[in-house]
Image: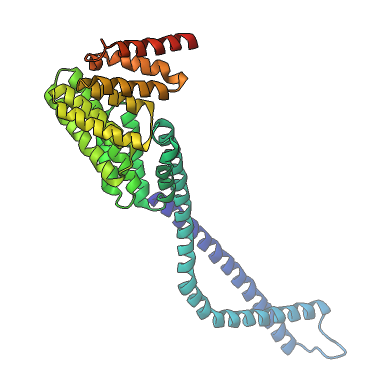
Amino acid sequence: MKEKDSQGKKGGDWKKTLGTILFLILAIVLIAFVAIAIYFAVDYWWSDYTVNDPPPPLEVAIAVLSILVTVFAIFMALITWSTRKDWEKFKEDQVPIINDLRKGLDELKREQKEIQWIKDLRDQVIQTDPYLRKPESQNVVKSIDNHYHTDQDIEAWKMYGVGRSLDIETNYKEAIKYYDKAIEISFTDSNLKLHTNQSLGIVHFQMGRRLEDDGDNGDAIKEYELAIKYYDLAIGINKLSEEAHNNKGITLIQLGKIEDKPEYYKQAISCLEKVIEIEDNYDHHYDKARAHALLNQRNKAIESLTRAFKLVNPEKLGKLLKHLTDDLEDFRNVQEQEEFKALVKRYTDILKGNN
């Protein structure tokens, strides 16, 4: 900024110097014409020119031209002098306005760049986040479009974007810092707070899974409890948040398994039933089946699992069967049931037939 101001100052000095030089040249020319006019006037006065013996025509022409130039110069000087005060007043009143207009144009260009930046960020976030790609999440997308007009909202979405990128890279501790900043900065955008709280819940859940895999169940429980805290904050903002209810239910299942407390499974079932009311999706029924199986509610577990298989799209059937294989320990109370075996065999055969 200082370098730019210095360059502007140098440009102004250069123009001022050129103007001074031109003024001096014009002044010298004017003085020359005045001197010539005086010379011819004195010469005519002291010479013996008569009507019959007039001065040479060239001298007369030069004298007349000199007088005309002198009169014109005096006239312009008087006009300049009379308008000088008006010019000074114009500079005093209008130049600040012109400068403000220039600043306004620069600010507008900056805001347009920021707007484009936040739109690009929005597109990147949507592409990397399956939740935002869902039709019911378009209110979040609209929120980004409708709230980018203030510096505060732009900065909040920047923090969320950085947190999201760190989250994708599984750099969870750093991601949490930027998610927290996004919530702290944004006071008006409830959709940003909703989605950031959901993201914080997912991050803490993933950290809990890491700790659980490492055998650190104590710290894993703390992370799961933090995850539930953020899911509850998200639900407080939007009671119909499918993602928050679903993820809370999954986290409660993990807490029930790690602490061996059946009440967590019951709470998980309650959450998942709310999710099913919002969206009757196969994966919600699958997680509900897990919770019923862990509670040794065999009939309800098989009923929920049957519903999951009926709802799943053919292209996702393999994914559901893989989940079932990975989570087979959760179904230990029902896997010896004939209904369970028949259900798994039926859809395994369907998958083989599709392939």
Q: In which quarter of the image is residue 261?
A: top left
Residue 127 versus residue 52 in the image, above or below? above
Q: Position of residue 311 (x, y in %)?
A: 41, 25
Vertical order, 18 against 262 (above or below): below
Image coordinates of residue 217 in percent, x first then y, are: 14, 22
The x, y position of residue 104, in whole percent, is 46, 59
On screen, residue 170 versus residue 352, left or right, reads: left
Most distant residue in the right direction? 52
Residue 29 figure quarter? bottom right
Q: Can residue 243 be seen at all in this image of the molecule?
A: no
Camera sees residue 81: yes
Residue placed most toward the observer, 119 or 63: 119
Q: Image point 49% across, 76% down: which residue?
A: 88
Residue at 49% over, 71% down = 94
Instruction: Report which quarter residue 262 is drawn in.
Output: top left
Give the number of callouts: 0
Residue situated in front as seen by the camera: 96 or 268: 268
Taking the spot 32% from the left edge, 16% from the top edge, the residue there is 324
Between 178 and 237, the residue placed more toward the observer is 237
Question: Where is residue 201 shown, x and y percent of the image?
Answer: 25, 34
Q: Is residue 111 above or below residue 269?
A: below
- Determine whether 90 is above or below 313 in the image: below
Q: Is residue 101 left or right of residue 69?
A: left
